[in-house]
Amino acid sequence: MKDKQEFFELLGEIDGRDFSEYNRIIGDYDFARYVLKVTRIPTEAEDPGTVFVVRVPTQVAGFPPNLYTTAIRRTALEDLLVRKVSDALSKVTAYDDEGISRRRLFVATPGQKILPRSAMVIADDYIEARLTVNLPARRGRILGEEARHVFFEELPAVVNASLVYCNLDEIEVARFVDLMEDADAIRQNLPTRGLVGFVGEGAFLIRLDHSDKPDYDRDVPLSVPEELLVDIEVPNKGRVRGLGVPSGITVVLGDAYSGRTELMKALAAGIYNHIPGDGREYVISMPDTVYIAAEDRRSVQRVDISAFVRHNPAGRDVRQYTTTHADPCAAQAAAVAEALEIGARTLLFDESDSNSGFLCLDSRLQGLASGIEPRLIPLSVCARKMVDDLGISIVVAGAASVTEFIPVADTVLRVDDYQVTDITREAKQLAIQQADLRPDAEALARLVEQARWVVPSSLDPSSGRHDAVVGAEGIDRLRFGNYVVNLTAIAQLADTCQTETIGLILYYAKNRYLDEGRPIRELLDLIDRDLSTEGLECLTRDLRGDLARPRRYEIAAALNRLVSLRISRVAG
């Protein structure tokens, strides 16, 4: 290992030289309180920044071991430290010799949700931050003095402000870690309480427009009457009270401005833990909860939608439905089948982004269609059979399109101005005539039995002269080879870093596991195993600081929407 003085002198030696001379700084450098690791340098100044590693020994960082004794507490502390690094970076600004502000250090900044990330690693004997560095250069020539400012003034300030425990607010750190542990404890308690979701009393659900951040100016706390409150014991706070969303079929009634939609979005987001101050800290859902939305013109490959669609007007086989431009009803039916195929146990629907024909059939109009064989079997007809036979739960919300669910519902809740009431008894007294249709038990059973086998060659990441072109073009657009996957309808994607990681996972799966065809479920099981045992580092040879772990359901959503995907056979 080299001394930091050697690094300082080396930056002086290469000042003014061609950018390629930056390769001379590759190596490890002892900065006394931390080690700077340089493993790769971009070939040209215009190339994207490269990842530098800052490794702080545990003795120097000084974080109490109880803050990271379990996997869940370790993830929380790693997430918090990424945020602290991001805050510190925003406060240090370099100016070039022309007086122009040029930020050179970056980190993948998290949003409202706490995720396993590659930007920070806490091991038993060190803490490692992975920063992206845009090396100073002008017109292909190295700016050595500016590089010295980055590495000898900015970087030490960032490390001291964010990665040394005594320089942080100890109460804030403990609260952050304890909160995630408590949220996870609630999630672990849900099955034993017969619940699929939990919404803490007083939760703030309204978000800013086109944002995941809370809107404190117009937010109203969720109000839950005493008779609906359940208590859950957690290790740090003691007792948390809130609304328990029971297993089975739950109908949530309310208009578009009642808080119903915000509640459903919060339950969808409840698969993740949230940071203090988010408002949804104690909104918790089971990890296998999937929000199902309609979408237009998506690709579908050999999905059995016969449980919901008897006949397709285009003449396509509904047992192996295939198209590159599915209509919203067929697309939502396919999304249900795809989610159940890989293990989803709770399905969420809201009429605001569902197809009305898929959700229900207005029984009042049946007489006008007498003698006509219905092409659709709506979810309202299938729901009871799905819950009883498949062992799943369904939460469906709306005002106009969910009436048909009330006769088969276990629980009916009403949301009005963010006040939740249980109206199951009153709702059951309504004279609601159910549609004169019967669910297809065999078709419903196939939803969890089918196994679609991937054709390996259909996952092709190449484009033109490049062997692999894979990357996120935003949170809802994934480039994979010659195709862009539209993920707009995937409500539970939390971060662009997740989208980036999904692309790498598909590439990884192609290279490691698709030497021959495999069922999608088996492929996802293998990926989950690798990510759990080897971490995100298994996905790429290059060191990355911009990855965040996605769930299997979002990975499958991207795979299923890839236009080039081909299925060789369907078993089950």
Image: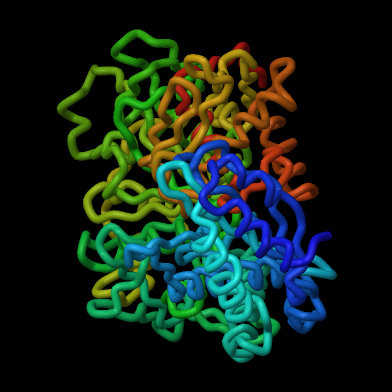
Q: Is residue 232 visible?
A: no
Above or below residue 42? Residue 185 is: below
Q: Residue at x 58, y 48 (%)?
A: 50
Residue at the extreme left: 368
Q: Is residue 392 left or right of residue 416?
A: right
Quarter holding the N terminus? bottom right
Above or below residue 217? Residue 265 is: above
Q: Is residue 372 visible?
A: yes
Task: Give the x, y percent position of residue 130.
Answer: 63, 58
Task: Give the x, y percent position of residue 179.
Answer: 60, 79
Residue at the extreme top: 315
Which quadrant of the figure has residue 159? bottom right
Which quadrant of the figure has residue 37? bottom right
**In front of the other: 250 or 346:** 346
Q: Residue at x 69, y 16 (%)?
A: 517
Above or below residue 75? Residue 278 is: below
Q: Residue at x 41, y 23 (%)?
A: 299
